[in-house]
Image: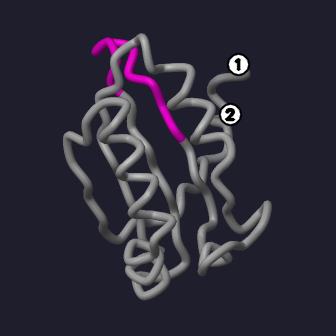
Amino acid sequence: MIGLEILIHIPSRHRHEFIQSFEILPYAKKVGHEGTRSCIERSIFECIDTPNRYIWMERWTDNKSLETYMQTDRFKAILGAIQILGKIDSIHTGEISEFKPSPPESSFSK
């Protein structure tokens, strides 16, 4: 599995527009547009310790699908919109392992 992480700074006056634009993005569970069928998950997190900072994270089935998507006009338009609303601090991709929660410890119930 491959991950995409984009660190973004959006001024508070543009927060609503940024969140709204994120909500309309298609991915596998919704539409499957332009190669996004391989996008397993797309999430955005607001950093509570750094005002106006967001982390956009995606999980993809494979690197080829993510690379293909990153070359689409749709992805480039999204990045352009982010740059109009604020600024992109960094973009990272890399292998990730699937998170598997541990079963509850029996000592917690004692």
Q: Is residue 67 left or right of residue 17?
A: left
Residue 46 part of the magenta segment: yes
Residue in the image at 71% along x and 68% along y: 28
Residue in the image at 34% along x and 37% along y: 84
Q: Nearer the viewer, residue 58 or 24?
A: 24
Please tell me whether the stretch drawn in magenta is mainly helix, strand or loop: loop
Colouring style: one colour
Q: Amino acid at mark 1?
A: Lys
Q: Kindly indicate the quadrant of the structure image that contains residue 85.
A: top left
Residue in the image at 47% along x and 76% along y: 69
Q: Residue furthest left?
A: 89
> Which secondary structure, mark 1?
loop
Per the rendered image, the range of residues in magenta is 44-53
Please state the horizontal and vertical placement of residue 82, each as a whole percent of the image: 38, 41
Q: Nearer the viewer, residue 44 or 10?
A: 10
Query: Which residue has dot 2 on it?
Result: 106
Please state the horizontal and vertical placement of residue 5, each as a whole percent of the image: 35, 52
Disc 2 to disc 1: CB gap under 8 Å: yes
Q: Is residue 32 left or right of residue 69?
A: right
Residue in the image at 45% along x and 49% along y: 57
Query: Which residue has dot 1 on it?
Result: 110
Q: Nearer the viewer, residue 100 or 83?
A: 83
Residue 12 part of the magenta segment: no
In the picture, which quadrant includes the C terminus?
top right
Please state the horizontal and vertical placement of residue 26, each as a whole percent of the image: 68, 59
Please state the horizontal and vertical placement of residue 68, each as a whole percent of the image: 43, 83
Mark drawn on residue 88 = none
Q: Nearer the viewer, residue 104 or 8?
A: 8
